[in-house]
Image (spheres, helix red, strand yellow):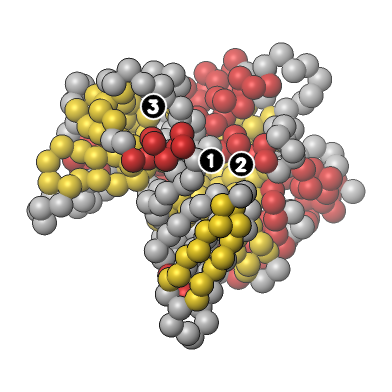
Amino acid sequence: RYHFASSFPIASIIFVVPLRSVGVVITTPVSKCYLSSKMIFSTQLAHLPSPGRAHQCSPRRTHQRQGNALCHVRQTRLQIRSGPADSAKIKTRRPAVVVSNEPVCVNGLNRLLVFKPTDGEDLEYAAGNVMALTLPGENEDGKELRGPYTVSEGDADTFSMLYRIVKGGRKTPLFAQLEEGAEVTFDGRYHDPIIVEAQSVVGGSLPTAVVGISTGSGVGPLWGFAKEFVKEVEGDEGRGASVRLFCGYREREDICMQSDMDDLQSTSGGVFSWEATLTSPPEDWHGLKGRVTDPAVVAEFVRGLGEDIEASLQTTHFHLVGNGGMLAELKQGLALAGVPKERVTIEVYFNYSAEAEQSVVQGIADTLLAGKTAAA
């Protein structure tokens, strides 16, 4: 996959890129150019060193270098992919109805919307895919209520997305008003699901170990991926596969899908485990405390990597979802500790232009390296 991005101080540039047997010529202002061999076009260049994915928007995948760290990054912009199957699905808006719209945490701010298409066509979504969702009506400016959102789970009949109601937000308060049977339209399948990203690193097979780290509603696609992972390795005795989620929240009442997580942990045969960490824990909280970037939490990443931590850091896949500031720090800290660039994938939900605080980056790396030393 080839990516071209430039900010040279000239008016425009022409790229000629052979794509299979087809020649593609694009002329565009250089500061607004993005091209890949999968024919993904965008009208905005990634703001380096932004870690990459705007909250609940359609992703653009690129590669960014921060220091010596080059990682896979997903930004969300509505764009077009080549290929007749995907193109047809992107161009055609499909009808769907709301199956359910239920709170998944104690305070009710995080909710899971489940949709069912009504056109009888095949549905091919998995955790981490992105679709464009259009609500009925218009906003106060007379524009349609349309935007890209990350799929939490998908099967042959339904797909879902986890969202948080943002006070004063443009769309999430309207999502909360959708009742069973409400009609919407959707289109697009804009990004590889998480399970495909994890497989692509090791030649099409799943990595033995995956660590997922999320903040807030970013746990949605990681939860869907964890279920897919457990199903894929079911019956694979002796492989020692594992997927572990570390989910950052502010308060205990924000924790999403706690009973579902616990059920999967108890029935997965040791494949799945999860922990929540709180930045404002109550006095009776006995779990992890602090941000997902804090040393006490990072130490838990290491604790589950086995005896040969150095070798495990080379083969474990890390997928990070949520607050761009914290994920930028995690990305750079993992790289500084020697985690290979291809083993880290990111999707930023908000705060995606934030820069990493270097003292935090160093703390993450030091904690991981201390884990190596302790194991040795």
Give the crowd class for mark 1: few <14, some 14-19, many >=20 residues within 10 Å. some
Which image quadrant for residue 334?
bottom right
Q: Are marks 1 and 2 in contact (CB under 8 Å)?
A: yes
Give the crowd class for mark 2: few <14, some 14-19, many >=20 residues within 10 Å. many
Chain-order first, disc 3 or disc 2:
3
Give how far across and how far down residue 40 sits, in percent.
Answer: 49, 53
Give how far across and how far down residue 84 sits, in percent.
Answer: 46, 37
Which residue position holds label 1? 192
Q: Is residue 372 left or right of residue 359?
A: right
Q: CA distance from mark 3 to mark 2?
A: 20 Å
Q: Is residue 101 above or below residue 39?
A: above
The answer to whether any part of residue 193 appears in the image is yes
Give how far across and how far down residue 285 sits, in percent.
Answer: 48, 38
Which image quadrant for residue 149?
top left
Q: Is residue 221 above or below residue 353?
A: above
Which residue position holds label 2? 197
Residue at far bottom of view: 9
Give how far across and how far down residue 19 sits, in percent.
Answer: 59, 52
Q: CA distance from mark 1 to mark 3?
A: 15 Å
Mark in front: 1 vs 3: 1
Residue at far right of view: 376
Q: Residue at x 24, y 24 (%)?
A: 97
Numbered disc 2: secondary structure: helix
Residue type of the residue flagged with mark 1: Asp
Residue type of the residue flagged with mark 2: Glu
**Which dot marks residue 159?**
3
Chain-order first, disc 1 or disc 3:
3
Q: Is residue 180 above or below residue 4?
A: above
Q: CA distance from mark 1 to mark 2?
A: 7 Å
Of residues 5 and 126, the one nearer the viewer is 5
Residue type of the residue flagged with mark 3: Phe
